[in-house]
Amino acid sequence: MGFQAAAPLRTAPSRSTGVSMAIEDMAGISTEVGKVVWDPLKLSANMDESNLNLIRAAELKHCRVAMLATVGWAWTATGTHFNGMLSNHPPVSFADAAAAANPLAAAAMVPGAGIWQMILAIGSLEVYWENKYPSNECAGNFGVPAVTQDPAELRKLQDAELKNGRLAMLGIISFACAIGIPGSIPLYPF
């Protein structure tokens, strides 16, 4: 992503007033959610700074994955594909996967060994990054330099990342539901 994730929350003097102060300082507060952090179940009421950082890191991770998944869905849905073989045993080419009825059917063509390769690669990256930048301390900030030194502009970019990510999460689940449950999403596929 081109900008720094939400900075870790500051430690507050006391648990009772400090947590709400830290929540009020988090990125993601906007008019869409009533100028408050969206927490309808009030789960953050009993969280300390470490847990808030962990939850924010999880949200950012899901946002970033959903944004990539949405682009991947569009890539696959248009029939665009790489050249060559996806798997030699059984023989499956990228063209075969692109010719599938939909992106879920294309994903189902990936052999079990390929799924395990992805799980191991993603798991290895997760362990590496969690050891280098613990979620409960870094809150999704992986040490990438911010694109701006202006705090107001940085906050605007952090809010934009969260808003785009939240929309992407709704989008990718909508795409999958539209394929899995035909007619469940109005106007899909346009």
Image: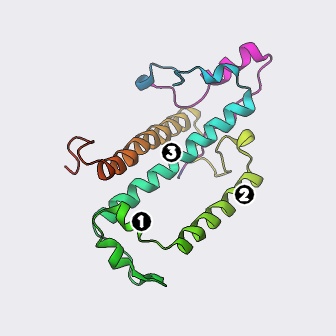
Q: Position of residue 27 (x, y in %)?
A: 56, 31
Foreground mark, 2 or 3?
2
Amino acid type of the residue that numbered disc 3 sits on in the rendered structure:
Cys
Mark 1 or mark 2, which is nearer the start of the sequence?
1
Asked if residue 162 is among those painted magenta in the image, a careful observer would answer no
Which residue does the numbered mark 2 point to in the structure image? 127
The label number, if any, that marks residue 63 in the structure image: 3
Q: Residues within 10 Å of mark 1 (few under 14, many from 20)?
A: some
Foreground mark, 2 or 1?
1
The stretch of residues the image draws in magenta is 3-30
Q: Residues within 10 Å of mark 2 (few under 14, many from 20)?
A: few
Along the line of sight, the residue nearer the viewer: 34 or 123: 123
Residue drawn where x is 40% and y is 41% of the image:
170
Amino acid type of the residue that numbered disc 1 sits on in the rendered structure:
Ala
The dominant secondary structure in magenta is loop
Mark 3 or mark 2, which is nearer the start of the sequence?
3
- Name which quarter of the figure residue 83 lies in: bottom left
Is residue 161 visible to the viewer in this orientation of the structure?
A: yes
Asked if residue 55 lies left or right of residue 177, the reply is: right
Along the line of sight, the residue nearer the viewer: 82 or 35: 82
Q: Position of residue 144 (x, y in %)?
A: 64, 52
Tag 1's secondary structure?
A: helix
